[in-house]
């Protein structure tokens, strides 16, 4: 067999190029895997978990999502030593769809009628509103200007809960005055929740919302309210 030095050189060059290409591709692939499998930014508090895309809903004019609403509700309960109870954003929908039996077990370990305040965020399609219940005075208030029927549904739930827990005092005497507000953003609902829970006046306005968004973002990341 004849041996050609130049052929050896060509093969060697091809092998070197192929090897370098393979190494380059492996490094590129490895870097991609590292990026996709590395832990993402996440804020965890009790049973709640917020990803960066959840927190991003607090930016600009975005609609905030259920994850933000519910974790903030958890912080509110913690800040009031659980004297305030926050029923998460899925509660009202479940109540509307399945009635009292659909949510009866949600408060199995909770005495709602011993609380100073019950907060019920309500999400109807693209609109957030808030129902606030004062068990002591058997008062239900709606913090919204559009949906006047909401307190009646919550009232029926509370009467059913009172019967379930044998609380005769809370089966009658409820009042549902309507409070009109033109502010219909989820950020307003969270600010209502915080101020009502901490017994602070609702003396904020639309122009403060950008600052409030940033403050809520920081509170969630730090997992505590700024009192």
Image: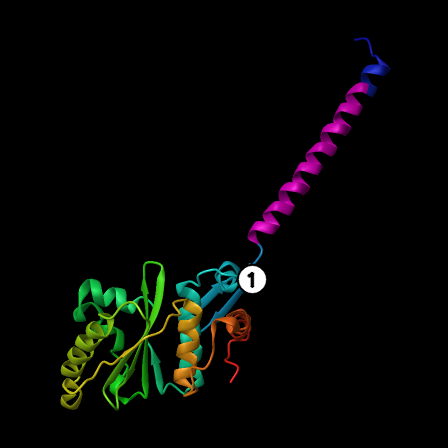
Q: Is residue 8 left or right of residue 196?
A: right
The answer to whether any part of residue 88 appears in the image is no
Assess disc 1: are there few (<14), some (14-19) or many (≥20) residues with their C-alpha within 10 Å of its C-alpha.
few
**Residue 181: horizontal and vertical position, in percent?**
36, 73
Which quadrant would residue 140 be assigned to in this image?
bottom left
Identity of the residue drawn at 44% across and 67% down: 68
Identity of the residue drawn at 16% across and 91% down: 169
Q: Which segment did they paint magenta? A: 10-37
Q: Is residue 86 left or right of residue 221?
A: left
**Residue 202: horizontal and vertical position, in percent?**
42, 82
Identity of the residue drawn at 24% across and 78% down: 108
Looking at this view, is 97 or 24 the one in front? 97
Looking at this view, is 27 or 174 the one in front? 174
**Residue 82: horizontal and vertical position, in percent?**
37, 85
Q: Is residue 210 left or right of residue 182?
A: right
Does dot 1 land on a helix, a strand or a loop? loop
Quickly name the residue at label 1. Answer: 41
Magenta stretch: dominant secondary structure? helix
| Residue lying farthest to the right in this orientation | 5
Which quadrant would residue 109 be assigned to in this image?
bottom left
Which quadrant would residue 145 be assigned to in this image?
bottom left
Identity of the residue drawn at 39% across and 83% down: 196
Instruction: Judge whether residue 105 is colored magenta.
Output: no
Q: With respect to residue 155, does 6 lie above or below?
A: above
């Amino acid at each position: 067999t004849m041996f050609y030095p130049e052929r050896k050189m060509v093969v060697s060059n091809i092998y070197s190029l192929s090897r370098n290409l393979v190494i380059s591709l492996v490094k590129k692939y490895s870097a991609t895997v590292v990026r996709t499998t590395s832990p993402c930014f996440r804020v965890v508090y009790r049973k709640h978990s917020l990803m960066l895309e959840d927190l991003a809903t607090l930016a600009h004019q975005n609609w905030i999502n259920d994850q933000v609403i519910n974790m903030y509700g958890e912080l509110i309960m913690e800040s009031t030593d659980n004297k305030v109870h926050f029923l998460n954003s899925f509660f009202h929908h479940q109540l509307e769809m399945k009635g009292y039996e659909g949510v009866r077990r949600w408060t199995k370990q909770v005495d709602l009628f011993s609380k100073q305040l019950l907060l019920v965020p309500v999400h109807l399609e693209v609109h957030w509103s808030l129902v606030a219940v004062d068990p002591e005075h058997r008062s239900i208030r709606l913090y919204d200007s559009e949906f006047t029927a909401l307190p009646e549904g919550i009232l029926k739930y509370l009467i059913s809960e009172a019967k379930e827990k044998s609380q005769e005092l809370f089966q009658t005497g409820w009042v549902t005055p309507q409070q009109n507000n033109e502010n219909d953003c989820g950020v307003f609902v969270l600010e209502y929740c915080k101020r009502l829970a901490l017994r602070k006046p609702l003396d904020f306005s639309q122009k403060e919302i950008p600052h409030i968004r940033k403050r809520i973002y920081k509170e969630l990341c730090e997992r505590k309210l700024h009192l």
